[in-house]
Amino acid sequence: MNAKMKRREFISLLGGAAAALPLAARAQQSERMRRIGVLLRVAQDDPDAQLDLQALRKGLQAVGWVAGHNIEVNYRYASADPDQMRAYAAELVGLPAEVIVAGGSFAVAALRRETNILPIVFVRVADPVGQGFVTSLARPGNNVTGFTSYEYEIIGKWLGLLKDIAPHPDRVALMFNPTTAPYGPGFFRSFETVAPSFAVKPIGALIRDAAEIEAAISALEQGARGGLIVLPDAFTDVYREQIIALAARHRVPSVYGYRNVAAAGGLISYGVKSADIYRRAATYVDRILKGERPADLPVQRPTAFELAINAKTARQLGLTIPDKLLALADEVIE
């Protein structure tokens, strides 16, 4: 009898101790740690990539996912290297991650070669339908969905900005790496269509290494009537400092797709707010972890754009920024 009583008292004490635990502690005990992957096209020490990831983490926290508490986040950085990208894609699929955030087309293509089952949420991807990642924007139809960056028609906006700030170019190159930017030819076709209305000759500057970057930009210096549009891709992201420096050395006015390039010394940029896209991507990660399928989540277009002008670079190139551009700019960098 005494033994039975002692046993009952012991069990009661255990139950009371559990009830006395703080609510958050008991919730943590009951939650399963979820695993997500993030595959980026740039280097780990890229400061702008870290700002994007900070936005992703804040977005996840806003919907209840905290690294080390209820999610484990595995990051991989490919530095625009095709071999690294393929290896890291296989690693993340092999973990396995429950959902993978893919930064750019280069990452999505590598992941698609590894899986048609694990959910993939892409960010900063151009023409996901044309690249075969989704069936349509409204109904992606497979294991991939996400957030686009640019449509081909934006090339007209970039060219218009270039002619506004530097009226003299009569030949303009569109620079991209065909390996890391398979969407490049689509932008170039759009470029060829709009170029005559701006009285410029469109040039395709296909680059695959540092030497080809220098050759393409130095060729635009001849006659001082060249201009440059740098298409965002994994390669031009990694080599942006070299591109900026060469454009300055050869006095070639240039337009870029993201604010961070203008902040680093590029003349002018117009494009989506990258951190905003990463923050929004967190909502799709959340919905997938809660059971929704990528096939049922429509691909989202960007909602926030920004125009940045580097006034110091303009002065170095001997350019005067028109008042109408200054009025439109979200940021003028001195």
Image (cartoon, rainbow, N blue to C red):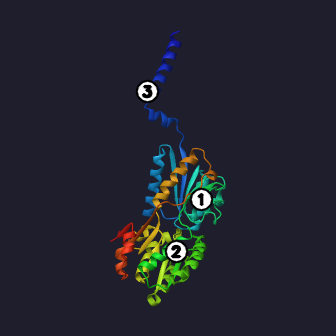
What amino acid is at disc 1? Ala
**Secondary structure category for the residue under label 1:** helix
Q: Which residue is mark 2?
A: 156
Residue 124 is at least partly visible in this image? yes
Query: Marks 2 and 3, Cα distance to the nearest angstrom?
Result: 65 Å
Dot 1 crowding, Cα within 10 Å, few <14, some 14–19, many 20+: many
Q: Which residue is mark 1?
A: 89
Q: Residue at point 52% right, 74% down?
A: 156
What amino acid is at disc 3? Ala
Q: Are marks 2 and 3 in contact (CB under 8 Å)?
A: no
Report the mark closest to the observer, 2 or 3: 2
Q: Position of residue 137 (x, y in %)?
A: 61, 59
Report the mark closest to the observer, 1 or 2: 2
Query: Marks 1 and 3, Cα distance to the nearest angstrom?
Result: 45 Å
Q: Residue at point 59% right, 61% down?
A: 108
First in sequence: mark 2 vs mark 3: 3
Residue 264 is at least partly visible in this image? no
First in sequence: mark 1 vs mark 2: 1
Quadrant of the snapshot with the C terminus: bottom left
Q: Is residue 300 left or right of residue 130?
A: left
Q: Is residue 73 above or below residue 209?
A: above
